[in-house]
């Protein structure tokens, strides 16, 4: 839990557009009481250390996917998503911030399509995008506007 919270906290601290909403110790408590207690967390290890993690809520929603910066670009994120897809047995959804172009490119390479946008209906108050993956996701899916589903 602590290693996962540390990965997230380092990401927040290194991301200039991401506001710090919760103190680092509060993130660890939140992970302990929610992510780890109410869902499935898939951990990736590399050379004896936690390289990243993915949290599944209700088995069909990715509520967190973060990698340690030193392990990015090694296929770990794709492997974590592949395992989540296997467990989902159908569609899988996730949110990413509109500012996070790198994550958007990554999810689209993994077969996710954007289906909804908001202007900041989250605790950070930042615009975000809902992505959907289906085993045979339609290439015809388009991005909705105004926060409505497509």
Image (tube, rainbow, N blue to C red):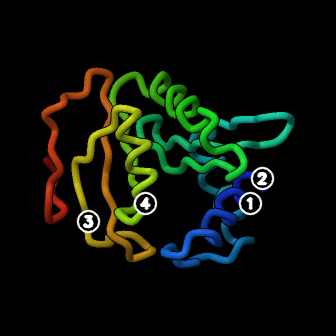
Quadrant hosting residue 28: bottom right
Count of all numbered marks drawn on residues in the image: 4
Closer to the camera, 56 or 118?
A: 118
Task: Give the mark nearer the N terminus: 1 vs 4.
Answer: 1
Q: Which mark is residue 100?
A: 4
Mark 4 near mark 2, Cβ–Cβ under 8 Å?
no
Q: Which mark is residue 6?
A: 1
Pinpoint residue 119: horizontal percent, then vertical percent.
26, 71
Label 1 environment density (alpha carbons within 10 Å; few <14, some 14–19, many ≥20): some
Q: First in sequence: mark 4 or mark 2?
A: 2
Question: Is residue 143 shown left or right of residue 43?
Answer: left
Look at the picture and state if 128 lies above or below 48.
below
Q: Which residue is mark 2?
A: 3
Query: Which residue shows up at 40% across the image and 57% down it?
Result: 101
SS at mark 3 in the image: strand
Q: Earlier in the sequence, mark 3 or mark 2?
A: 2
Residue at left 70%, top 35%?
44
**Nearer to us: label 4 or label 2:** 4
Circle on res. 118: 3
């Amino acid at each position: 839990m602590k290693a996962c919270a540390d990965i997230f906290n380092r990401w927040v601290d290194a991301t200039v557009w991401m506001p710090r909403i919760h103190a680092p110790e509060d993130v660890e408590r939140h992970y302990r009481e929610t992510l780890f207690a109410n869902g499935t967390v898939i951990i990736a290890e590399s050379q004896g250390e936690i390289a990243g993690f993915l949290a599944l809520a209700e088995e069909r929603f990715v509520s967190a996917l973060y990698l340690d910066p030193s392990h990015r670009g090694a296929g770990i994120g794709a492997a974590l998503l592949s395992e989540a897809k296997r467990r989902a047995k159908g569609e899988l959804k996730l949110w990413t911030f509109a500012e996070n172009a790198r994550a958007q490119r990554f999810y689209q390479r993994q077969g996710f399509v954007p289906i909804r946008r908001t202007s900041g209906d989250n605790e950070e108050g930042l615009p975000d995008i809902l992505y959907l993956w289906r085993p045979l996701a339609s290439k015809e899916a388009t991005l909705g506007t105004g926060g409505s589903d497509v």
